[in-house]
Image: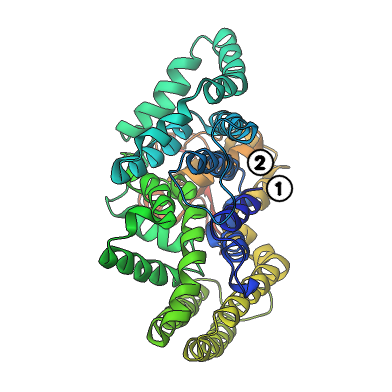
């Protein structure tokens, strides 16, 4: 739904280009759907993708109201003020914003409202922005979001304190959940999130500089998308808790910016087209080096029957071939070829990963096989964890259907401890390893613990 919504927004604001393959109506949903963040979080057991999709739909509805009030230009016919269509857009804005609040809380109001306020502040378009506070929008928002919150608060006395204050305000203002990251964290996360299309941000930057020099950025539709993309990144950069999924709402407008700017840059300048294509080539080269680095960390048997060296050689050869094709596309100013090659590469990578690579990596990435292996243990009450990070602990608790206690060196009885390399070193120094330790080359290491001398 989110991909279709931004495709419709691209068509509504820019129409259909003479070459449909380079139209924002096609490019925006394609870039969005094949980005790393969307592929990854669409498969994750979190509400982040649903939350982001609802914000997209709310912002698309908001753009209809801003357009009808003269705040945004559009290629399609203007919607008359006070028309049923404007009323419908206001109602949809409230409904989708309410669904986003149901998905992950009141942050939806801050992200959507903050992005629109940033755009209104920069362009002095306050009147169209305040139109979104119409009673129809507020009423539809309350009808969708309030009943569930009221019922939860009525049945759970601590709901307001725990969910609203602790998991929203306290999470943002303090590092209570231990998600500390450096100030620049979301900078590189954003670049990774839009892979393999990161190079298209070069075209967005070039187009932005052109509008700045021409002093026409205030009337640019792209500036509305830029505010929509920038606000979540800036807002969560100031947070004391940072997780990669927080900036998912910024990915759809980034896809729109890339879809709008890339065709213009490719048509306008061969140098600009080559610089973007060189960016794509660099991305694939960097990915091949990353594969080479990660492949060396697996046991000598490799992934299945394929050795790490073979995996690395294949990745480097394929990335070199892709880089040559992409550079050729830049020289010939063929954006459609660049998009086709990149899209097919993403599709092939996802297919190979799902069929061959991820099943082999499951023991290194998921707690599922460990829980299945230990489910028949004769003393399940004597299985502990030690020094594992939060993701492993959460995964084990999910697949064991109970939380595993943290082992203590003062624990007197024998046990089986699931730990990592650092934990093994501490357990070995404490002299608690029972027998000879055979470390399985998997994500979690099993350590038999001897009882303390009586």
Q: Quadrant of the C terminus?
A: top left
Viewer-side residue, 337 vs 47: 337
Is 259 rendered above or below residue 100? below
Is 169 rendered above or below residue 16? above
Name the residue rendered at 48%, 75% in the picture. 287
Q: Is residue 146 left or right of residue 125?
A: right
Label located before the other in sequence (1 or 2): 1
User: Is label 1 in a helix, a strand or a loop?
Assistant: helix
What whole-number distance in Å separates the C-alpha atoms at marks 1 and 2? 8 Å
Measured as percent of width and height from the top left, residue 56 is found at 55, 45
- Residue named by callout 1: 372
Give the number of the disc on residue 289: none
Disc 1 to disc 2: CB gap under 8 Å: yes
Give the number of the disc on residue 399: 2
Name the residue rendered at 65%, 36% in the picture. 380
Q: Is residue 449 visible?
A: no
């Amino acid at each position: 739904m989110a991909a279709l919504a931004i495709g419709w927004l691209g068509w509504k604001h820019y129409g259909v280009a003479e070459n449909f393959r380079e139209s924002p109506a096609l490019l925006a949903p394609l870039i969005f759907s094949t980005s790393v963040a969307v592929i990854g979080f669409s498969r994750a057991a979190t509400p982040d993708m649903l939350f982001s999709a609802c914000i997209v739909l709310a912002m698309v509805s908001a753009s209809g109201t801003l357009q009808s009030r003269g705040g945004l230009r559009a290629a399609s016919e203007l919607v008359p003020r006070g028309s049923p269509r404007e009323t419908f857009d206001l109602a949809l804005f409230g409904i989708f914003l309410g669904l986003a609040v149901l998905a992950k809380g009141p942050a939806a109001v801050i992200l959507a409202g903050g992005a629109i306020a940033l755009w209104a502040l920069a362009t002095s378009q306050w009147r169209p922005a305040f139109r979104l506070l119409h009673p129809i929008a507020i009423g539809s928002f309350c009808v969708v979001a309030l009943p569930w919150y009221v019922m939860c608060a009525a049945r759970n006395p601590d709901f307001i304190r725990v969910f609203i204050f602790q998991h929203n305000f306290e999470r943002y203002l303090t590092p209570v959940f231990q998600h500390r990251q450096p100030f620049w964290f979301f900078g590189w996360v954003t670049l990774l999130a839009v892979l393999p299309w990161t190079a298209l941000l070069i075209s967005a930057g070039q187009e932005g500089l052109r509008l700045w020099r021409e002093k026409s950025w205030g009337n640019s539709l792209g500036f509305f998308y830029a505010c929509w993309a920038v606000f979540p990144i800036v807002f969560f950069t100031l947070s004391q808790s940072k997780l990669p999924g927080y900036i998912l709402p910024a990915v759809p407008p980034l896809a729109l910016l890339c879809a709008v700017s890339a065709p213009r840059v490719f048509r306008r300048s061969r140098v600009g087209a080559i610089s973007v294509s060189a960016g794509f080539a660099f991305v694939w080269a960097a990915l091949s080096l990353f594969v080479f680095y990660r492949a060396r960390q697996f046991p000598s048997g490799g992934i299945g029957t394929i050795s790490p060296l073979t995996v690395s050689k294949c990745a480097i050869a394929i990335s070199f071939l892709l880089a040559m094709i992409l550079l050729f596309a830049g020289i010939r100013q063929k954006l459609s070829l660049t998009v086709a090659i990149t899209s097919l590469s993403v599709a092939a990578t996802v297919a190979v990963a799902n069929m061959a690579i991820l099943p082999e990596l499951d023991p290194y990435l998921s707690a599922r096989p460990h829980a299945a292996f230990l489910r028949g243990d004769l003393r399940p009450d004597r299985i502990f964890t030690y020094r594992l990070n939060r993701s492993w602990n959460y995964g084990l608790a999910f697949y064991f259907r109970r939380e595993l206690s943290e082992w203590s060196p003062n624990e007197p009885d024998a046990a089986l401890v699931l730990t990592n390399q650092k934990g093994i070193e501490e357990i070995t120094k404490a002299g608690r390893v029972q027998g000879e330790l055979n470390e399985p080359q998997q994500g979690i290491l099993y350590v038999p613990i001897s009882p303390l001398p009586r």
